[in-house]
Amino acid sequence: MLSFNLLVTICLIYVAILFAVAGWAEGRARAGRAKFLQSPIVYTLSISVYCTAWTYYGAVGSAARNGLEFVTIYLGPTLLFVGWFWVLRRLVNIGRTQRITSIADFISSRYGNNAPLAVIVTLLCVIGSTPYIALQLQSLTLSFSVFATESVELSQTFIAFWLAVGLALFTILFGTRNIDANERHHGVVTAIAVEAVVKLGALLSVGVFVVWGIADGPADIFARIPPDMMAEGPIVTPRWATLTFLAAVAIICLPRMFQVVVVENTAEDHLATASWAFPLYLFLMSLFVLPIAIGGKSFLPAGSNPDLFVVTLPLAFDQFGLATLAFLGGFSSATSMVIVAAIALSTMMSNHIILPIWIRANRDRNPQSDDVRSLLLVARRISILAILALGYMYYAVTDGTAALASIGLIAFLGVAQLLPALLGGLFWNNATRAGALAGILVGFAIWAYTLFLPSFEGQFILSEAALTTGPWGLQWLAPRSLFGSTIEDPLVHATAFSLGANGVTFLIVSLLTVPSALERLQAVRMIASQDATPRFRASSGSTVEDLFILAQRILGRADATTLFDRMAKTQGKESGLPDLTDSVIRNLERGLAGTVGAATAHAMLAQVSGPEDLSVEDLFAMADETAQIMEYSHELEIKSEQLAANAQKLRDVNERLTELSSQKDVFLSQVSHELRTPMTSIRSFAEIMRDSPDMSESEKHRFSSIIHDESVRLTRLLDEILDLSFLESGKSKLNIRTESITGIITRSETSVAALAARKSATIISDIRPRALLADVDGDRLSQVLINLLTNAIKYGVADTPIIRITARSRGPEVLIRVSDNGPGISDADARLIFEKFARVSDTGEKGSAGLGLSISREIMRTLGGDIELAPSLKGATFDVTFPKSHTAQQAAE
């Protein structure tokens, strides 16, 4: 007889082997050598996580109690993979294109990224999976108890507790070592595939032993079938159909099955292999179920637990090695289920409950300033502990007395409440969030009332009297005979009422409500499997640097850098960050969705990007207003000329007005030209896209990118014009305070450091004294210095570009001088450089409007100073002057 301690040691060695396999697989994946690990065979074996302790132990127990009813456990998934393969293919396709991380993420994304819906689905999955966690604890506890000797007197509750603790720690170490950008766990999947082989080999070995080791072949074993296992009446009954249906639904609705079938899928073609390989695996798993059940009934003492025949049969014949292998098969079945289920559920809890609560509680903080990866890891580890604790509490309250198969069916029907919303979201454009939410809540409530709470047998919420006669003695409310139903089977009764009410509610509410714009957009994206208009546009409230920092917090520096490098190269940049475009934000949202879920990624980007942006329609309106201003100004010019001709005594005034009008004419002409160029591009490409319905996606992307870039250029131009207008009108508000000139110059140098590095330019600063102070608006002065430094870097072309910036105290003023060693500015150009739209070189970047020096001059004059071009033997030199602070002047006096 194997000792209990030896069995524990064997389990620990087995777990260590699984860790080694997982570590090896993750190392291969990181090195880009995971071709075999991402093969269809490994993918198919990972789907075998469906075969938990329910199918390993419980199927034999079901066969011993109910004959051929156990076949439904395997028949449902087989029919789904063979007959409804196209449904699985659509799910996998959407999961890959939309970067879905869980079934809660899928449903909430389909119905407009609705956070409350994601929370409801997550809670339902956690509650629905709780009986299944308890099932694994019960199966392991019973199998451990078989090996416990008299010297090891341990209660089953004690064993279950420490098993729950061990499984929680095992899952935390096994499945939450890092946050993967795609939520794919190559190490876990490979280890699950190994466990699939172990449990299949163990079950086949026990079957072969029973048929040919104990009995004398198949004929002998089937001749021993007891009368109570013979089916009486028709095999195909309402219960048979219900069991087959629930087993099929479990493949797409159970969180762990959605995880391995959809989330962990690395290639859509793997489903083609799984469509025949997984039914074959199920056939092999079921091959010896009936012979083992017959052998247990025939060769073991009366009253033996049928759920443990797989282990007790080898022990009864002193086959301790085979018994150990059988135990490891059951251990593999339970641990694989707990690992994947806990990973899936913890992902849902952290993404849809914990992280959104943290974001809401810290809405005033910028999420880029926090390490979201660490938060997610901690949240998932806490979630795993909570999930295992719930499973243990369910086991402790029910005393683990229910048959394993019955517990599994309770969980199956619980998560099956997601089916109407899931299928409706896949195939019905007009399915609404309200319909999905109402259907799930109604179905969940009826399931809990008619099946989940009764499973506690009067020990939780509902008393035994309430189960029999209904609450308050209302017989029509009795959970097992709702509304006077005569359906005797509790499972069939609960399935009919819960899923029936769920589907009808979902249909009626969806017909009575109108989907929001975002719901319609998501319906197009997921049902039509095509991308649509991005949910965010680039906002002036954020920069690409902000988004890069946020991505690092969630994806990690390496993955974030890879993502942004790829986007930069798509824009034709060899290095640096990409320009902030709609495409960048859309791709970033998808990247973040792979880790935190689509709904949370949407919320985080909304918080960072901000809702305010400038649409093309806004630009058209601004252009129309500018045209009206130009027309009005032209009328003023005509009137001023008439006044000049008719009133000699006002000739001087008229000459001045003529000069002003001429300047205005030039200004408006230049504004018109600068506005017309991008507007022409926007209009032309928009018309091409409108009139070419068959345009390819690549052309659409190229034309929309051009429209976006021209819109950004136009926005920048309008911002500069408005800034200049406010300065000239004296309406600009200044924040005057005593500031350090050294600090302002240092900030300015830092702002242009990247540009200087690209141009191989060296900036040398000399400030005397270092404690020089001035009463000034530091931000505005920094704006002037940044403009001068930028111009010096761009236009100061030299073999070794050097820009010098000096600051001196000159009487009551501060003098800042910016000079370069470039070609300088000619005398002809020197008279134009401070004029609006004046550009004396064509070497500047596209989109420069020639307003920088005009704005700089107005800023300095507003500050009580000035800016001028100083004589220089080589290069260009600009002098910026403004008053010192009163404190500095008094100190000098």
Image (tube, grey):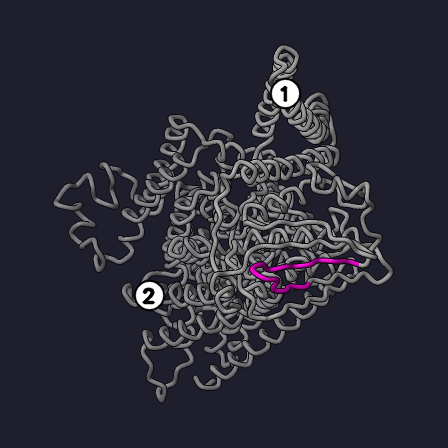
Q: CA distance from mark 2 to mark 1?
A: 97 Å
Relative depth, front residue between 257 and 278: 257
- Residue stretch in magenta: 806-820
Measuring 26% from the left and 38% from the top, which residue is drawn there?
A: 486
Which quarter of the figure has residue 392? bottom left
Q: Is residue 97 visible?
A: no
The residue carrying pointer 2 sits among few (fewer than 14), some (14 to 19) or many (20 or more) residues within 10 Å by Cα, namely many
- Residue labelled with disc 2: 395
Task: Give the SS element for disc 1.
Answer: helix
Relative depth, front residue between 407 and 371: 371
Check residue 813 for magenta coloring: yes
Relative depth, front residue between 571 and 454: 571
Q: Position of residue 97 (x, y in %)?
A: 62, 45
**Which mark lies nearer to you, 2 or 1?**
1
Measuring 31% from the left and 52% from the top, which residue is drawn there?
A: 452
Measuring 53% from the left and 64% from the top, which residue is drawn there?
A: 773
Q: Earlier in the sequence, mark 2 or mark 1?
A: 2
| Majority secondary structure in the magenta region | strand
Q: Is residue 851 visible?
A: yes
Q: Amino acid at mark 1?
A: Asn
Q: Position of residue 757 (x, y in %)?
A: 74, 61
Q: How many marks?
A: 2
The residue carrying pointer 1 sits among few (fewer than 14), some (14 to 19) or many (20 or more) residues within 10 Å by Cα, namely many
Q: Give the label on residue 654, or none.
A: 1
Measuring 34% from the left and 42% from the top, which residue is drawn there?
A: 441
Q: Position of residue 193 (x, y in %)?
A: 61, 64
Task: Give the SS element for disc 2.
Answer: helix
Check residue 420 for magenta coloring: no
Q: Amino acid at mark 2?
A: Tyr
Q: Above or below — where is 877 with respect to 385?
A: above
Q: Residue furthest right?
A: 799
